[in-house]
Amino acid sequence: MLRVFLILVILFALSFSMELRKVGEGVYMAEGTYGLPSKENRGFISNAYGVLTREGWVVIDTLSTPELAREFISELNKIKNVPILYVIATHYHMDHWFGIAPFKEEGAKFIAHANLKRFYEDGSADMVLESAQRSYGVFNSVKLFPPDIVVEERVKLRIGGNTLEIIPMTPAHTNTDLVIRFGDILFVGDLVSYKRIPFLGDRNASTKGWLDVLNRLSKFHFKKLLGGHGDPMGRDAIRWTKDYITYVREKVKELKDEGLFVDEVKSALKDTPFKNSYMYKEFHMKNVYSVFNELDMEL
């Protein structure tokens, strides 16, 4: 019995361990699990990426906590022990930004959308952090920092013979979304997902704008999409994300036009063609509620 218990403990620990995966030339990925932050998964619910240049690393997203970020940095150093020069946040959600402190300790310059800096400066970031600390129990060591460099228009970051193009894509998932192009790879944060329900309920989200962004992305030339969650994706992931958002918008509008109240709309849309997707239970009803209210604001 003890042997079985020890095996289960080891398997559980390995399931949330961090091992980098090469997903492109000079591009390495830490892949988180599906779910909400918890003590069991240590908040390791999202992806982070390292891009290796001749001069050092460029990191895309920070993971959720300083502890996870330090693990990620350690894994990057095993590949090549060179400075981390820049860290870019694809948006301001906790699993993409709350691990910023160790990167600042390493001397990295932090790049984000200008709205993330405004979010930090007006006190909203501290309120979100306090709420997350109460709700999840894994963010007690988080220390937030504002961006050193802010982006509001498309810019190019040239480093070590490489070019990374940083492209604002707002409003969509949030009002802080950035897409990063590196060769034939697009880092798309949470703008694109595949068989994982996207979260439409951010206070600065615009599903109408998000559909416009997905149409823009569909016109880009790329071989691979690297998102904030799950495995590397292809062009079919853009279609899948667009299909889900369109479905929710059209069904909610149809039911609203019939005079149904929000609870009735939620009840009617519990069972959908997307019900077998990851994070359906966690996000779908919240998405229906958010879109119900968003459509009122579009009138």
Image (cartoon, grey):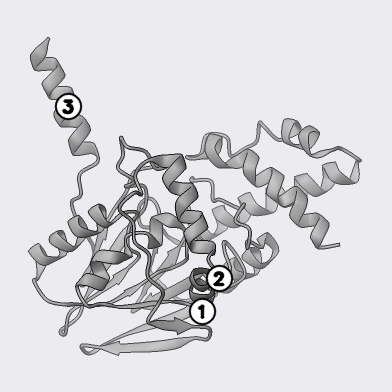
Residue name at image x 29 percent, y 65 percent? 101
List the residue tagged with mark 1.
114
> How crowded is the residue under tag 1: few (<14 C-alpha within 10 Å), some, or many (20+)?
some
Task: Tell me residue 111's x, y (percent).
Answer: 38, 78
User: Taking 86 as reference, is 175 left or right?
Assistant: right
Quadrant of the rendering where the N terminus is positioned: top left
Q: Find the distance from the CA under tag 2 to the CA under tag 3.
A: 43 Å
> Local crowd at mark 2 within 10 Å, few (<14), some, or many (≥20)?
few
Q: Residue at x 42, y 46 (%)?
A: 133
Q: Position of residue 117 (x, y in %)?
A: 48, 75
- Return the disc, 2 or 1, that comes first in the chain's sequence: 1
Amino acid type of the residue tagged 2 in the rendering? Asp
Residue placed most toward the observer, 276 or 16: 16
Residue at the disc numbered 2? 122
Q: Amino acid at mark 1?
A: Ala
Q: In front: mark 2 or mark 3?
A: 2
Q: Which residue is mark 3?
A: 9
Q: Residue at x 52, y 34 (%)?
A: 276
In the rendered view, does 293 fall on the left or right side of 213?
Answer: right
